[in-house]
Amino acid sequence: MFFIKSLLVQNTIMLFSVGIVLCFLGRAFFKKNAKHVIVFLIWLCIAVWFFNSPFFGFSKVIVSRRGIEVNYGILSFRNTVLPLDTPWKIETSPTGILKTSKLYYIRIGDHQSMKVKGKKDVDLLNRIGDAVERTKKGRLS
């Protein structure tokens, strides 16, 4: 099991964001303000969309004989188990105003992890890839 970013923090952000919108939605519903109900339903849809969009990468990876399980968080519909033969690659993305810094992420099939920086985090991405290869070889033996 590998945690790229804290899944607890990610789930807390998801639940807190949706919880605030639901509180406002409930308040508007009980005050019978149809205009506010519609506005907060739209905000709820935006929040759920954001946590399922390409802007939000997965934080947790479990590599087992069953496959590669990627977990985006509690509100994501994209949590899935991929086959072990799914191609993976560590990629970079420029960041900063002048695009001089680099962020790193692992892409497994169509799924992209949260972006990280620093040698320690890049080593974690490499260990995920190594675990996939070791498990794949162990399965073929």
Image (spheres, grey):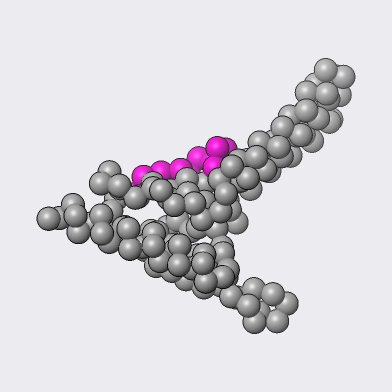
Q: Main secondary structure of the magenta part?
A: loop
Q: Specify whether 34 is left or right of 128.
A: right
Q: Is residue 14 something one can see in this rendering?
A: no
Numbered label tally: 0
Position of the C terminus by quadrant = bottom left
> At 67% from the left edge and 43% from the top edge, which residue is drawn?
13
Q: Specify whether 82 is left or right of 58.
A: left
> At 75% from the left edge and 34% from the top edge, which residue is drawn?
21
In the rendered image, the residue lying farthest to the front is: 120
> At 55% from the left edge and 37% from the top edge, which residue is drawn?
74
Task: Choose top left, top right, bottom left or bottom right for residue 7.
Answer: top right
> At 41% from the left edge and 44% from the top edge, which residue is drawn?
80
Q: Is residue 66 above or below residue 32?
A: below
At which x and y percent is residue 104? 52, 69
Closer to the camera, 30 or 121?
121
Closer to the camera, 88 or 49?
88
Q: Is residue 64 something one can see in this rendering?
A: yes
Q: Specify whether 96 is left or right of 102.
A: right
Closer to the camera, 42 or 3?
3
Q: Which residues are magenta?
A: 73-82
In the rendered image, the residue lying farthest to the left is: 141
At which x and y percent is residue 88? 36, 63
At which x and y percent is residue 82? 34, 49
